[in-house]
Image: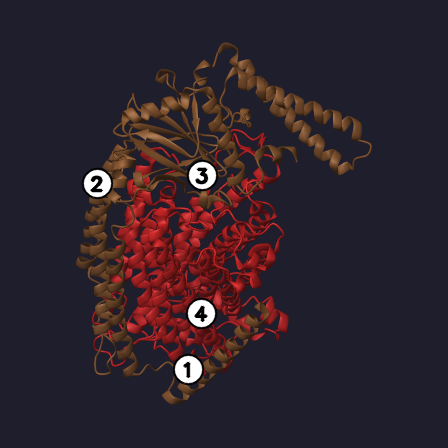
Chain colours: A red, B brown
């Protein structure tokens, strides 16, 4: 292994010396350099996130003040979908659907893994680049094409897909059922097919790079936890995205070729369909076989990022390195056998339901281990509050708060009464949405100097963190109680039911926080784009971190390191080691005589 | 007006960005330091804010529990719901304890151990004993939660008793229909087939009459279409002709399926469907008796959600699902209990099903058993009244949903 990578390096050095000047297109557009591709993913994801966040503002206006007229809704959506400033009912469902799709897939999967796996896997493993730069480039451009198609579907005459981001058939299969299930759903399916291709190309590359291109001395047990998290995430993606692809393909067949995989005995629009013998529940099984690992595809990179940042900024080794790896692996494994908990009330065999209750609640154990390890890492630390560190602490808090309510949802008996209510919306937005996005913010603040060679403004970072965490809890915590009152999700308004009158003011609270929180993201956007051009020049190792990426020159060069790739001699968490003067020892520093590797 | 607003927003946006840029440049100068060097004052400020945030969060959480903790739903109106509520409360105790314990540890340590130049962090890379403790304790707690939860789950999903009252709840975009087996309890609900659904037979119930009617209806449509194609094929565009031919083929296939039902029914009189009772708008269930709901759906997946009874089950086209429960508080008692004379139990749709998903509801009335019997007799007995119900139901249908009524769509 060591010799293999050595040879490879030699080859690369050779290549490096002879490389010719890149032109604009090969450097900035069809780049095969992992650093550029990572920036491309990040900027695309930021753009998609703005779109999806604007959508949530529009439908939160409707939910907070149903029936109220808002000029800007008409200005944004036009007469067709926002006549007189009132959001159209079909458009409401479309916004909810596309908001979910973009946030889950384009921001928190493509954006989070695409950005940080690309940036950090070669840097922190000590590789010149990804195993295949070409596939890596393809991965981004599939992602880009997929994003364009998803956004393009917003401009279709019949509107974009609107059956919820889970697109359950028959609703999504039958254009007669809702306008969004016509052309909009076709575009959605095509977009997702391309997205799956992107995720697979990226994932294979990540796995191969981690396994084969680690520098000399970088044993698997010396990898930073970020890489472990990205590695397991990539495995989850490679195993589960093909199932989504199959699932989507069968739906395309049902929609366009008259097959009946998911359809049976349907009578709609006064017409009895020919399809018979299929099962809508089959779709749900296939969808959630991806859908649940997907939750961890979103979450694990964020947990990896926060592990690294919390350790660095606490100036203390991450507590229980091996237990952290173990829990990442356990979560990864368990995530494949819990999908049925999304389907407790589909009429599934109660015994099967009981099995899923068991496996689902098991996931709480590795999750709890992670939380306690984070807390122990902070304990007796010497914590530097960079914006990245603040977001990481925020992540641990939302991971706890969102995680504990999962106990209720995982319990099939309790799920009966809260299934598909706002309680679920609260739960997954806090545990998966907020935690993952906090991880993403933390990553951006922490590795911005590595990406752009400049620093982001710290003061604005503080302002951004504090408004964001307050608004995050302000938006999603009250939703638990809206859900406990029995209010279903994906309702256009609640005024049809007197029983929901008493939570109407909670909906106003949520909407106000949502709007303020959305505006507050302007601080981040400004800080990000302004710093790209005007930020302070970054020093070599701004956070006094041990990992390899900070040994490479600040200016990006092809091949990452000018000379030989540095050799690794220790694990990445030697912070505040007793008997050492500095409170950090980079991985490249050889062990002294008699000094123990962690 | 809108244009003016847009201009104002743009102007404000530009001002905001300019101000941010100013702040950006000023703070960079003022700090007279590198961005990566977080001063002690900043560390202390953020640490203190984290602690303040923790208390604010706790206040926010506690306020919610006080104001909305019990206001969500009234006491369970079903027997199994009481067990679910007890289970829920048990879980809440654990969840709240864990929430406060872990968040407090997190924020308190985050506050206490902010960076001071004279200190050094404690090098503490691992401790297997601690890891073991916080693996085993959650495992034990979860084991209790799992065992308790599954016991309740097994009770709730247990087989219904033989003498349970069977009621079918049938969903379509965007309303519900309830079907009772009629006064002759023994013969139960009649069989159904989705091919028989029509304006006069909304649930596709199989009776000799319904089969004959549907067959005649389809036969007529086929003939009409054949006639049309025959006479107009020369003046039609190819595309239109293709569409009509496809439609004709489809109708013929439908007709042949109805024919098959008729063939199958030769050995079966299908009489037990004759007294089935269909109701819309509201349906009644008796207090203290076990009710077994059978769910079917006509078009897409819906979900029958009865929050007051802690009951929910998806309705899935192509298959039947079921849920059993025993109502224990009558509508009248609940009205007195809540001091709200207009209170009604509701059945609502809880699976996204289209534009009017948010208003797909039906009232539920829990009666004393005698009143229930009387109500059911009223529904079943006089023929005219039953017709009247269907009539109103139909009217509702055309006004409630925003889409076109089914028949009209079929003609287009």
Which SS class for mark 4? helix
Residue receiving disc 3: B302
Instruction: Classify the position of the C terminus of chain B by image quarter.
Output: top right
**Quarter of image, res A320:** bottom left
> Which residue is at 40% across, 77% downward?
A460
* Disc 1 packing (10 Å; few <14; some 14–19; many ≥20): some
Q: Chain of mark 4?
A: A
Q: Badge 2 sits on which subunit?
A: B
- Which label lies toward us, 1 or 3? 3
- In the picture of the structure, the residue carrying the numbered disc 4 is A519
Of label 2 and label 3, which has the lower sequence position? 2
Tell me the quarter of the image containing the N terminus of chain B. bottom right
Q: Nearer the viewer, mark 4 or mark 1?
A: 4
Distance CA(mark 2)–CA(mark 3):
30 Å
Determine which of the numbered discs, if any, sits on residue B148 in the image: 2
Say whether residue B329 is left or right of residue A433.
left
Q: Are marks 1 and 3 on the same chain?
A: no
- Residues flagged by tags 1 and 2 on a common chain: no
Residue at the outermost right position = B234
Q: Residue at x 43, y 21 (%)?
A: B276
Per the image, label 2 sits on a secondary structure element best described as helix
Could you say which disc has been placed on residue A539 in the image?
1
Work out whether B6 lies above or below A289: below
């Amino acid at each position: 292994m060591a010799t293999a990578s050595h040879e490879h390096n030699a080859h690369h050095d050779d290549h490096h010396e002879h490389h010719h000047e890149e032109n604009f297109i090969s450097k900035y557009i069809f780049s095969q350099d992992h650093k550029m591709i990572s920036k491309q993913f990040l900027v695309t994801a930021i753009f998609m996130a703005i779109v999806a966040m604007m959508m949530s503002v529009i439908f939160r206006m409707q939910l907070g003040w149903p029936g109220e007229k808002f000029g800007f809704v008409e200005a944004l959506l036009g007469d067709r979908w926002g006549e007189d400033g009132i959001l159209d009912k079909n458009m409401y469902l479309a916004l909810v659907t596309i908001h979910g799709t973009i946030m889950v897939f384009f921001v928190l999967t493509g954006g989070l893994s695409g950005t940080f796996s690309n940036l950090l896997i070669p840097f922190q493993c000590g590789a010149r680049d990804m195993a295949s730069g070409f596939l890596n480039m393809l991965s981004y451009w599939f992602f880009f094409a997929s994003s364009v198609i998803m956004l393009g579907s917003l401009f279709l005459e019949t509107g974009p897909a609107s059956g919820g981001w889970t697109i359950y058939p028959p609703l999504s299969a039958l254009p007669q059922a809702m306008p969004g299930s016509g052309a909009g759903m076709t575009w959605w399916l095509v977009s997702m097919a391309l997205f799956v291709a992107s995720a697979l190309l990226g994932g294979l590359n990540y796995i191969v790079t981690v396994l084969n291109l680690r520098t000399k001395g970088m044993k698997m047990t010396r990898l930073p936890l970020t890489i472990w998290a990205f590695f397991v995430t990539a495995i989850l993606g490679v195993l589960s995205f093909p199932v989504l692809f199959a699932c989507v393909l069968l739906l395309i067949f049902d929609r366009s070729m008259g097959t009946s995989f998911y359809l049976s005995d349907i009578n709609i629009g006064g017409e009895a369909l020919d399809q018979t013998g299929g099962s809508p529940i089959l779709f749900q099984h296939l969808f959630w076989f991806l859908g649940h690992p997907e939750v961890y595809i979103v979450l694990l990179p964020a947990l990896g990022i926060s592990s690294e940042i919390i350790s660095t900024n606490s100036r203390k080794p991450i507590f229980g390195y091996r237990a952290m790896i173990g829990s990442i692996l356990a979560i990864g494994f368990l995530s494949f056998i819990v999908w049925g908990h999304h389907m407790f009330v589909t009429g599934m065999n109660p015994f099967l339901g009981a099995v899923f209750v068991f496996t689902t609640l098991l996931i709480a154990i590795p999750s709890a281990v992670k939380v306690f390890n984070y807390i122990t890492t902070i304990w007796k630390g010497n914590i530097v509050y960079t914006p990245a560190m603040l977001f990481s602490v925020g992540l641990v808090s939302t991971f706890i708060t969102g995680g504990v309510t999962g106990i209720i949802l995982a319990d099939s008996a309790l799920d009966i009464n809260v299934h598909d209510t706002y309680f679920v919306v609260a739960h997954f937005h806090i545990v998966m949405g907020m935690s993952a996005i906090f991880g993403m913010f933390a990553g951006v603040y922490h590795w911005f100097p590595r990406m752009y060679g400049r620093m982001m403004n710290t003061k604005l970072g503080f302002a951004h963190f504090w408004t964001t965490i307050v608004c995050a809890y302000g938006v999603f915590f009250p939703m638990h109680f809206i859900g406990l009152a029995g209010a279903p999700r994906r309702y256009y308004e609640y005024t049809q039911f007197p029983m929901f009158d008493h939570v109407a003011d909670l909906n106003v609270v949520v909407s106000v926080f949502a709007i303020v929180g959305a505006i507050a993201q302007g601080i981040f956007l400004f800080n990000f784009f302004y710093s790209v051009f005007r930020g302070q020049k970054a020093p070599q190792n701004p956070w006094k971190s041990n990992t390899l990426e900070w040994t490479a020159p600040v200016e990006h060069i092809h091949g990452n390191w000018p000379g030989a790739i540095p050799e690794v001699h220790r694990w990445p968490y030697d912070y505040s080691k007793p008997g050492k003067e500095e409170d950090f020892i980079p991985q490249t520093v050889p062990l002294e005589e008699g000094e123990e590797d962690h | 007006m809108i244009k003016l607003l847009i201009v104002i927003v743009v102007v404000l946006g530009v001002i905001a960005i300019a101000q941010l840029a100013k702040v950006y440049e000023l703070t960079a100068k003022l700090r007279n330091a590198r961005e990566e060097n977080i001063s002690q004052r900043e560390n202390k400020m953020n640490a203190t804010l984290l602690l303040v945030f923790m208390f604010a969060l706790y206040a926010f959480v506690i306020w919610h529990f006080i104001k909305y903790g019990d206001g969500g739903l009234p006491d369970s109106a079903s027997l199994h719901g009481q067990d679910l509520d007890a289970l829920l409360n048990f879980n809440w105790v654990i969840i709240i304890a864990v929430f406060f314990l872990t968040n407090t540890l997190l924020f308190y340590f985050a506050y206490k151990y902010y960076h001071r130049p004279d200190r050094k962090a404690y090098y503490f890379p691992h401790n297997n004993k601690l890891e073991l403790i916080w693996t085993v304790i959650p495992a034990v707690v979860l084991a209790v939660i799992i065992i308790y939860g599954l016991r309740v789950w097994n009770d709730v999903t247990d087989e219904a008793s033989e003498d349970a009252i069977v009621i079918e709840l049938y969903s379509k975009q965007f309303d519900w229909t309830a079907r009772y087996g009629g006064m002759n309890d023994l013969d139960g609900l009649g069989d159904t087939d989705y091919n028989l659904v029509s304006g006069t037979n909304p649930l596709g119930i199989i009776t000799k009459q319904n089969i004959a009617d549907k067959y005649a209806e389809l036969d007529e449509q086929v003939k009409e279409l054949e006639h049309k194609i025959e006479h107009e094929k020369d003046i039609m565009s190819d595309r239109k002709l293709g569409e009509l031919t496809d439609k004709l083929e489809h109708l013929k296939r439908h007709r042949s399926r109805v024919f098959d039902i008729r063939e199958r029914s030769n050995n079966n009189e299908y009489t037990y469907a004759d007294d089935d009772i269909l109701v819309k708008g509201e349906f009644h269930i008796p207090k203290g008796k076990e009710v077994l709901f059978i769910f079917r759906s006509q078009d897409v997946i819906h979900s029958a959600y009865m929050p007051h009874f802690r009951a929910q089950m998806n309705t899935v086209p192509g298959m039947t699902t079921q849920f059993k429960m025993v109502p224990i508080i009558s509508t009248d008692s609940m009205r007195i209990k809540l001091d709200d004379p207009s209170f009604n139990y509701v059945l609502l749709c809880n699976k996204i099903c289209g534009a009017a998903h948010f208003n797909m509801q039906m009232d539920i009335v829990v009666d004393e058993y005698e009143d229930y019997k009387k109500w059911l007799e009223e529904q079943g007995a006089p023929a005219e009244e039953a017709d009247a119900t269907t009539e109103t139901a139909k009217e509702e249908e055309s006004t409630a949903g925003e889409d076109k009524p089914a028949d009209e769509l079929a003609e287009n």
